Amino acid sequence: MQQGKLWGYSVLPIFVINLGMMLAIGAYFALATTQPALVAGFDQGQLSFALSMFICIVEWAFAVSLIRRLNLMGIRTLIAASASLWKFQWLPALIVFVVLNAIFAAYIVFTIWTQGSWYRIEGLDAWQKIVMLVVVPLTAGFCEELIWRGYIFTQLEARGYGLEKAIVLSAVSFALIHGIMLPDKLLTTFLFGVVAGLYYARERNLIPLMQTHIVMDVWSFGLSVSS
């Protein structure tokens, strides 16, 4: 693959997402402490929803930028190198589906064991729950796999990085967009990135990874927003 801009997709999103989240969370709790009337009716559930929408907007902005840069043919090649998008080996796809879901399930169990419960997002309206179960998983499944597995990994390869280093570096970048303040989540998303990177390096098809990512986010967010 021809070399293109790498830092704008591997580094810049990390700063944009983490800085935006820290500023929003800091401002919210500062106002809640000093001027509670200004955030009355906007509880932590609404804050979590707003942060999720912010991340979706940022990820789509970078994904659209990448699509415009590479055009549809280039994006098509990233998603699947073969002639058909759906021409992939079902056994490796099933294995990666099971392994990635197992990694996140283990993270949830660990969180419940150490903290007493899984992360809950309470106080959302019905339409907000639908957004969390549809828009957020679709955004993560498409945008994150396209950028971090498809583009960043292949760009590292094009720059002469070995297979192992390309997988690790893309997984590090992927982990860091999920927050720099949660070590356990960083480790979980790093492992997710390594396993997904190994699959993509071997199969060169993002469709199973996108499907797996979407399914995993649907059930994990379902646990978070369920009453």
Image (cartoon, helix red, strand yellow):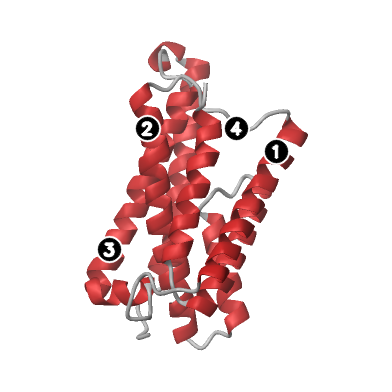
Badge 1 vs badge 4, beta-carbon distance below 8 Å: yes
Location of residue 92 by image quarter: bottom right
Q: State which tag comes first along the sequence, 4 or 2.
A: 4
**Residue beneath disc 3:** 65
Q: Which residue is drawn at 65% across and 46% down?
A: 105
Task: Decide which of tag 1 and tag 4 comes sooner along the chain.
Answer: 1
Going 56% across and 28% down the picture, which residue do you hit?
120
Element assignment for label 4: loop
Q: What percent of the width, then of the height, locates residue 20?
A: 43, 43
> Which of 104/188 is in front?
104
| Disc 3 to disc 4: CB gap under 8 Å | no
Residue 154 visible in the picture = yes
State how far apart marks 2 and 1 are (Cα).
24 Å
Q: Mark 4 points at which residue?
A: 119
Decide if residue 5 is in sight here: no
Q: Of the residues tagged 3 and 2, which is closer to the observer?
A: 2
Residue 39 falls left or right of residue 200? left
What mark, if any, has residue 206 been given in the picture?
A: none
**Quadrant showing the N terminus:** bottom left
Q: Is mark 3 on a helix, strand or loop?
A: helix
Pointer 3: residues within 10 angstroms few (<14), some, or many (20+)? few
Q: Is residue 37 above or below residue 207?
A: above
- Find disc 2 in the rendering and name its residue: 130
- Foreground label between 3 and 4: 4
Measure the C-alpha gap from mark 4 to mark 2: 18 Å
Three-letter code, disc 4: Tyr
- Judged from the image, the secondary structure of the residue bearing numbered disc 1 is helix
Q: Residue 111 carries which label?
A: 1
Residue drawn at x 47%, y 32% is 48
Q: Up-down: is 61 above or below 29?
A: below
**Dot 2: few (<14), some (14–19), or many (≥20) neighbours within 10 Å?**
some
